[in-house]
Image (cartoon, rainbow, N blue to C red):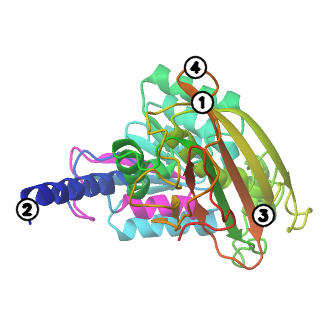
Amino acid sequence: MDDARQEDAMDRRGFLRTTAVAGAGLALSPRLVGQMGDEPRPDDINVALIGASAQGHVLLTSCLKVPGVRFKAVCDIWEAFNLRRAARMLKAYGHDVNAYVDYQEMLDKERGNLDAVLVATPDFWHARQTVACLNAGLHVYCETAMSNTRAAARQMVQTARRTGKLLQIGHQRRSNPRYTFCHEKLLREVELLGRIVAVNGQWNRLAHTPLGWPKNTEIDHATLTKYGYESMAQYRGWRWYKGLGGGPVVELGSHQIDVYNWFLDARPAAVLASGRPNFHDKKTRQWYDTVVAVYEYDAPQRPGNPDDLGTVGSHPALSGWVGARNGRVGRMPGERLSHGPVPMARGPGQRRHGRAVHRVARIPSAGSGQALPACSEGVSPSKRGQSPS
């Protein structure tokens, strides 16, 4: 291997190694060495988990792989299932945890024992629990969506600034090695796509029946009411109820919309959206299962070759979409187009309009996946219905 190729390989390995570490998405541990089940150390990061359902379980299992993270408490209102499962698992891994149903009781009794809290409860609890943890002097990792209202989200940010504690929101693609590679290497360093003026994304999730629960594990009605639920069925399907969750476009689409903001280095200036319940029973699904949204961006214009508009993508060796689907980066063959470039500039300044089209749908027979194709200025794919492999 010649020196140039060896240096390139070393840089690539270093980049992937760095982003793989960042892929944990939590930035909690100062040490990158160690083993699970080690004896407690003075510099361990002592954390608690609030919300031990599906996403909380994902965070828990991920944190068990991060050296220097020590669980001290776990909290969940579903005592007979979520709380019991999480506490047993943590103790099996050598973490001496206390289990709580009420998060305020946890904060009171664990005062002085914690450094940080992971919040993985339903969306409508995020702001209240995050603010309480920050005010208790704890750093917080909070799952997406940040909040159901802008006012509550603003309160979270203001509290973090006032207390001087860290607040991280779980847009996991920001720490996904594949996305960071696309952003830093493909879009910024080699400018693979030139000037991006359109982005298309979609997320199709397999439709399913309402979630149930194991026999004799129901939460009692008083506890459900205290924490904002009308029934066990509503607790299990909270994502679909207005006031509790935001439906698929929030649960799923927010992750891709965040990528649009990140890759375009801008925020939407306007949005046009339409949705309706096309598939699920309206009695148990208040939010729309099918949504189409168009976001207009006033994005910074990056340098590019104005003559390089004949293919989808600006790299001379590639012609196709570049995107991510099911965690894999790939591209599709493109076609050279006969028409000329479409003017997109707003004026003589260094800004121009871009557009992102996002679709979220529940379908009865297809699996889940996501695509983030992007096309260069003045051209569009000739086969719109396809997505990257």
Q: Secondary structure at mark 2?
A: loop
Q: Residues within 10 Å of mark 2 (few under 14, many from 20)?
A: few
- Residue type highlighted by circle 2: Asp
Is the residue 377 above or below the residue 149 in the image? below
Q: Which residue is mark 3?
A: 232
Q: State whether residue 221 appears in this view.
A: no
Q: Secondary structure at mark 4?
A: loop
> For the residues carrying marks 3 and 1, which lies nearer the camera in this image?
1
Q: Secondary structure at mark 3?
A: helix
Disc 4 and disc 3: Cα gap in Å? 58 Å
Whichever of labels 2 and 4 marks the residue nearer the N terminus, that label is 2
Q: Which residue is mark 1?
A: 352
Give how far across and how far down residue 60 sits, in percent: 45, 60
Residue sitting at 92 percent across and 62 percent down? 283
Disc 2 and disc 4: Cα gap in Å? 46 Å
Q: Secondary structure at mark 1?
A: strand
Whichever of labels 3 and 1 marks the residue nearer the N terminus, that label is 3
Q: Which residue is mark 4?
A: 348
Q: Which residues are magenta?
A: 35-64
Disc 2 and disc 1: Cα gap in Å? 43 Å
| Quadrant into which the N terminus falls | bottom left
> For the residues carrying marks 1 and 4, which lies nearer the camera in this image?
4
Whichever of labels 3 and 2 marks the residue nearer the N terminus, that label is 2
Left or right relative to 98: residue 43: left
